[in-house]
Image (cartoon, grey):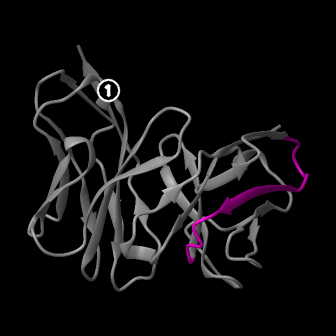
Amino acid sequence: AQSVAQPEDQVNVAEGNPLTVKCTYSVSGNPYLFWYVQYPNRGLQFLLKYITGDNLVKGSYGFEAEFNKSQTSFHLKKPSALVSDSALYFCAVRDDQAGTALIFGKGTTLSVSS
Amino acid sequence: DAGITQSPRYKITETGRQVTLMCHQTWSHSYMFWYRQDLGHGLRLIYYSAAADITDKGEVPDGYVVSRSKTENFPLTLESATRSQTSVYFCASSELGGVSPLHFGNGTRLTVT
């Protein structure tokens, strides 16, 4: 069965510092991996995805994520955090041998202080 | 405007009542999904649909019914609402299923009293 874990409920960083939001996954086949962001009272917005190819994926708003197959991780990163990055971040995975739907992690709240 | 619209935005209902949450998308995406969001659980998949008249269960389908008679609509019905179904419900669509990003509506906050 496919699963995804976000080990940190909350990440706190100062504006201008680099940020990392962690994600690990478990699948039987090959993973399709996604990051989404949610602002208060809104639906989730797509940030980036890894399907195949380069392990470093670049996405919206300066975010990037690194796929590490040996560690089964897909951590979200940004070199310099902004206060406006404060939001709830979700990692999601689909197993290419287990159907269509995405399975989401429980989410990590990112708080960027000025 | 193109997009995905959920209605109502907020709903309060009583235990045992039937309630239907609506979802409409204007992209003609093949795939549509219903998730519920609960504190401590993240998003959990209720049902999804790969095309009109094709639906399948997700992680937490019990107590819910879906239909997809038209590509653009994917209503979710709670046949007899329970307090445990108090949640925020999100509808999403995607063009190609698992390899395409999901586009989410703004959610329906449902309270069952």
**Where is residue B47 shown, x and y percent of the image?**
62, 70
Would residue B45 appear left or right of B11 to someone viewing this image? left
Q: Determine whether A18 is above or below B38 in the image.
A: above
Work out whether residue A24 can be spotted.
yes
Q: Quadrant of the C terminus of chain A?
A: top left
What residue is shown with label 1? A84
Mark 1: few, some, or many residues within 10 Å (few <14, many ≥20)?
Answer: few
Give the residue at the far top of this rendering. A114
In this rendered view, identify the residue nearer to me: B77 or B7. Answer: B7
Q: Quadrant of residue B55?
A: bottom right
The residue drawn where x is 13% and y is 31% is A80
Does the magenta-highlighted stretch encompass residue B102? no
Instruction: Please indicate, yes or no, whether residue A1 appears anywhere in the rendered image.
Output: no
Task: Tell me the quarter of the image containing the N terminus of chain A.
Answer: bottom left
Is B28 magenta? The answer is yes
At x 10% / y 65%, what residue is drawn? A55
Residue sitting at the far front: B1
- Give whichever of A65, B25 is nearer the camera: B25
Q: Nearer the viewer, residue B49 or A9?
A: B49
Please report, as a chain letter, where disc 1 is located. Answer: A
Residue A113 located left or right of residue B24: left
> How far across and how far down the image is residue A26, in percent?
27, 69
Residue visible at 20% across and 45% down?
A: A63
Magenta span: B13-30
Secondary structure state at the residue bearing disc 1: helix
Which residue is rendered at x = 45% and y = 78% of the image?
B96
As displayed, is residue B101 above or below residue A82? below
Q: Quadrant of residue A4?
A: bottom left
Task: Say which amino acid is labelled 1.
Answer: Ser
